[in-house]
Amino acid sequence: MDGIKEVKNSPLLNALPIWYHSIYTDGIHPDARFPRDRYTKLVEKLLYSKFAPNIDIRTPEKISRQNLLLAHDENYVDKFLNGELDEKQIKRIGLTPWTPEIIPRTLTLMGGAVSALEYVIENGGIAANLAGGTHHAHREFGSGYCIFNDLAVCAIMALENINFNRIAILDLDVHQGDGTATIFEDLESVLTISVHCSKNFPFRKTHSDFDLELEPGTEDEEYLEVVKKAIQITTNFNPDLILFQAGVDGLKSDALGKLNITREGMRKRNNLVFEMIKKESLPTVIFMGGGYSKPISDTIDAFYDLFTDASLANLELMKK
């Protein structure tokens, strides 16, 4: 992991497992508009912090083709794996200039999500992938920086386990989880909730089970009330597992967000979710989601809050 291990403290018992690989950054072309350096900057900030013993950085394996097919069309999967997507398909995804490294990056990123899921299935508590939340990927095409839908793959994998019959996907990214919504539009065992800006990408919205829309310029107080509503909907569903898309692109400084949420408001949002998780003792996987602030340090600070607070919540949860 490019020197990460040499600065890493020995994790505590029940430390928060987070899957990470340097290819999360290196697999995107340096000239792409996507802020690829956020991954390396964030992991360094976490591991040089006082919270380092609360965090256990783990290395993901690549996802299998078979698991990709749980949520995606075979023709689309194979065209991507063989490097045969056409210019229109690549443009729709948007991680251009395209590089051959995007293939192993995507497989490793998806593998990190699967590993986090497998961990909570076996151990309970909270686990995370330091990337992902690829909610714009539909069954037959990618979109909006998302190639395959890690939330959808994990939900279907969880349903194959006899102890998980009801999965809640709580999506608090500023953009609607349109791909997730279409994949699960006819599956009652998966609840899709999206809290997002009404006038933002995707401009053609799909239909989640619950779409809680916010107007541009929404600030902390109103935002947190809507998040509380989303959490109540989640609780009422009585899920066995939470898949938490925790994008921080609602920050006021975010270049793509259009909301006016402060760092403290974002942190309160996360802790509302963690309080529900602790109260209900719900296994939870965190998917990083979007974050495109200018300066990018605002995004990194907000994700730092997410993972450090998750580590504290996990310690409490695993004591039960």
Image (cartoon, grey):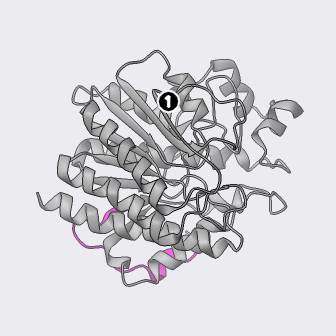
Residue located farthest toward the top when viewing the structure as drawn:
186
Q: Main secondary structure of the magenta part?
A: loop
Residue at x 67% of width, y 55% of height = 258
Please tell me how crowded label 1 is: few (under 14), some (14-19), or many (20+) other residues with Cα within 10 Å.
Answer: some
Q: Position of residue 184 (x, y in %)?
A: 48, 23
Image quadrant in which the N terminus is located: bottom right
Q: Is residue 124 left or right of residue 81?
A: left
Specify whether residue 239 is in view: no
Image quadrant in which the C terminus is located: bottom left
Provide the residue span drawn in magenta. 2-17
Q: Nearer the viewer, residue 199 or 151?
A: 199
Q: Is residue 104 left or right of residue 230?
A: right
The three-letter code of the residue at mark 1 reads Asn
Q: Is 133 located above or below residue 51 in the figure?
A: above
Residue at x 77% of width, y 48% of height = 95
**To which quarter of the image does residue 79 belong?**
top right
* Circle 1: element type: helix
Q: Is residue 271 shown in magenta?
A: no
Q: Is residue 7 shown in magenta?
A: yes
Q: Position of residue 214 (x, y in %)?
A: 56, 46
Residue carrying label 1: 67
Q: Position of residue 211 (x, y in %)?
A: 51, 34
